[in-house]
Image (spheres, helix red, strand yellow):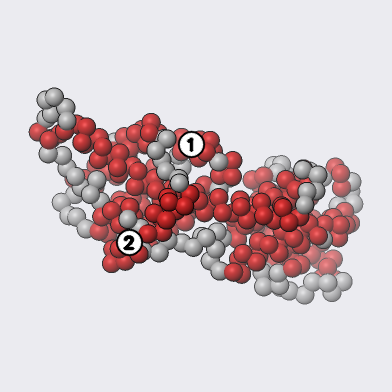
Amino acid sequence: MINRVLIRLKVMQIVYAYYQNGNKNLDTAEKELFFSLSKAYDMYNYLLLLMVEITRQAERKQNAARQKLLPTSEELYPNRKFVENRFIAQLEVNKQLNDFVVNQKKTWANEEEFIKALCEKIQASDIYNEYMAAETSSYEEDRELWRKIYKKIIFNNPELDQVLEDQSLYWNDDKEIVDTFVLKTIKRFDEKNGAGQELLPEFKDEEDKDFARRLFRRTILNADYYRHLISENTRNWELDRVAFMDVIIMQIALAEILSFPNIPISVSLNEYVEIAKLYSTPKSGSFINGTLDGIVKVLRKENKLTKE
């Protein structure tokens, strides 16, 4: 699940913290990097659980209405299409997701008011009402309902963002990326796989895990060389006048450009320019793009960089 976009962001955060904390032990910082990445995977599982908890809340609401002193006919015999959604029923018994609950002891039990409010918002939506009114019923329609709910109501939800931020500082910047993997998981679910449906793995393969480790270590261990290159190509600026975050981002970009021959330079440049736009100053994107482009030209001229 953890892709290279997320790895680059996490490396940037840990490298920044490494320098801010006075160059702490490199091995300790590397452990912090992988712990931070594992927390992103925890969020992925936690957001899958959210869909189950919303459905449970809808059922609790129906049960409470049925227990009223004078329930209406609709309350006594409610439409149970939503609470008996087959995709959610499959997700609720998923072996990997239940292992996560047992191992991490992570539930939505302490967020009752938020769950109630989110459930009400979903039930007031056109997506929900169209689903409930439809005469047809299939597993595919049940799964599609949740893809739509997630994309339209959960994906960009400030209240949810606040709940997640309150629970873990590691989750501040991860949700937008993790959301894309939740949506991908919904689309991958197949009824015939039952409780054994595979969720996305934490890392696609060992190569991505090695990418994280090498990128972080090369950034720190070759810092003097990378900063020399930056300084030589920003001669109109003293290095200490360049935004510290810009230096960090360029340092990581150079580690990637010089250490991973299979990654095209254009890919690396684009990725770090986008990071700069999000995490540094308004002008950082163009500044970093120009500086790195200049460094790449010099390295090619000196035959120190041969990849495309």
Report if residue 290 is visible in the image: no
Q: Which of 87/281 is in front?
A: 87
Q: Secondary structure at mark 2?
A: helix
Q: Which mark is residue 253?
A: none
Cα distance between the residues tagged 2 and 1: 29 Å
Please state the horizontal and vertical placement of residue 282, each as a whole percent of the image.
69, 42
In this rendering, the answer to whether 56 lies above or below 209 is above
What residue is at 48 percent from the left and 49 percent from the top?
104
In this rendering, the answer to whether 306 lies above or below 157 is below
Q: Which of 240/290 is in front?
A: 240
Report if residue 213 is visible in the image: yes
Please state the horizontal and vertical placement of residue 233, each as a whole percent of the image.
86, 56
* Image quarter of residue 210: bottom right
Q: Which of 68/185 is in front?
A: 68
Instruction: Classify residue 304 as left or right of residue 76.
Output: right
Instruction: Classify residue 93 as left or right of residue 246.
Output: left
Can you identify the residue that label 2 sits on? 195
Can you identify the residue that label 1 sits on? 163
What residue is at 77 percent from the left and 52 percent from the top?
25
